[in-house]
Image: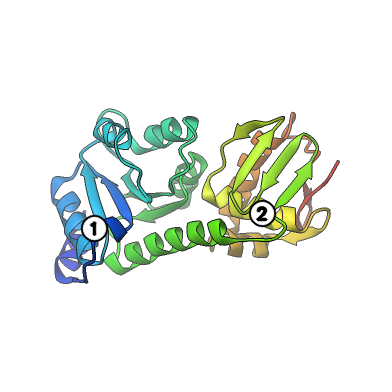
Amino acid sequence: MYKSTSENLSDLQGGGDTLEDLPHILVVDDDERLRQLLERFLKKNAYWVSVAKDAYDAQKQLTFFQFDVIVLDVMMPGMNGIELVHDLRSQYLATPILMLSAQADTEARILGLDSGADDYLGKPFEPRELLLRIQNLLKRVRRMSCESGETEARFGPFVFNWAKGSLTQGGNPIFLTEGEQRILALLAQNMDDVVSREALSAVGASDNERTTDVRINRLRRKLEADPSRPIFLQTIRGVGYRLCDH
């Protein structure tokens, strides 16, 4: 199953740096060989890497370390990757999560993203693509943390700070994945105006408009008393979506 991925990982090399200055990646996979190959490959490409053999091992490490990205296998014994993401997001852990799975069809991808993951990559994969996806997740986090100027939008009982990616309702925090943060940020910056699905897909780093629809539906469950009759996050049929200030 992992033949091409493993062979390609073995062939690639990169550089190094001072450990404290490197982004810290947690790799969670029950396949020992792939786990070791990923660890070596990412270390050669200037990352500080920790590994976990299953969800429970990952949970232990997350109590001691703060990670910049989690690379997570879906199919694992005991608690699987989907269940682990649900658990981490319920604890308001905002660390970007890249899911790996041998199930690369659209439905599996949607299930992974709907669980709260930020990106999804099918096995076997090209190591360079994995590297680019990790780099993109890190860039987006840095970009959001460096934004200045007007950074806050208010609608109904909600306050959204798009520089921090934080959403509150009556002062209580509401967890958003990174993909949801980017989509809500674009909608909030264009309050009461229609934003196309194409634009939302681009800012959400998705080449699949259905993935954008999944994220919109997930946002509605967090914003609307009745998601089937949205007040704030409205669909403009055939055009896109609009965030309304009511």
In the image, 172: left or right of 55?
right
Judging by the rendered image, the residue that carries numbered circle 1 is 19
Q: Quadrant of residue 8?
A: bottom left
- The answer for how far apart the CA atoms under marks 1 and 2 are is 33 Å
Q: Quadrant of residue 93?
A: top left
Judging by the rendered image, the residue that carries numbered circle 2 is 185
Residue occupying the point 77% across, 44% down = 154
In the image, 178: left or right of 53?
right
In the image, 45: left or right of 222?
left
- Residue 132 position within the rendered picture, expressed as x and y whole percent measured from the top left: 38, 66
Residue occupying the point 30% across, 55% down = 123
Mark 2 Cα-neighbour bin, 10 Å: few <14, some 14–19, many ≥20: many
- Residue 106 position within the rendered picture, expressed as x and y whole percent measured from the top left: 47, 52
Badge 2 marks a residue whose secondary structure is helix
- Residue 233 position within the rendered picture, expressed as x and y whole percent measured from the top left: 75, 44
Amino acid type, callout 2: Ala
Residue occupying the point 45% across, 53% down = 119
- Residue 26 position within the rendered picture, expressed as x and y whole percent measured from the top left: 29, 47
Badge 1 marks a residue whose secondary structure is helix
Residue occupying the point 55% across, 61% down = 146
Q: Nearer the viewer, mark 1 or mark 2?
A: 1
Q: Nearer the viewer, residue 78 or 3?
A: 78
In the figure, 198 relative to 122: above or below? below
Q: Nearer the viewer, residue 187 or 46?
A: 46
| Marks 1 and 2 in Cβ contact (< 8 Å) | no
Quadrant for the C terminus in the image? top right
In the figure, 38 relative to 229: above or below? below
Amino acid type, callout 1: Leu
Q: Is residue 103 visible?
A: no
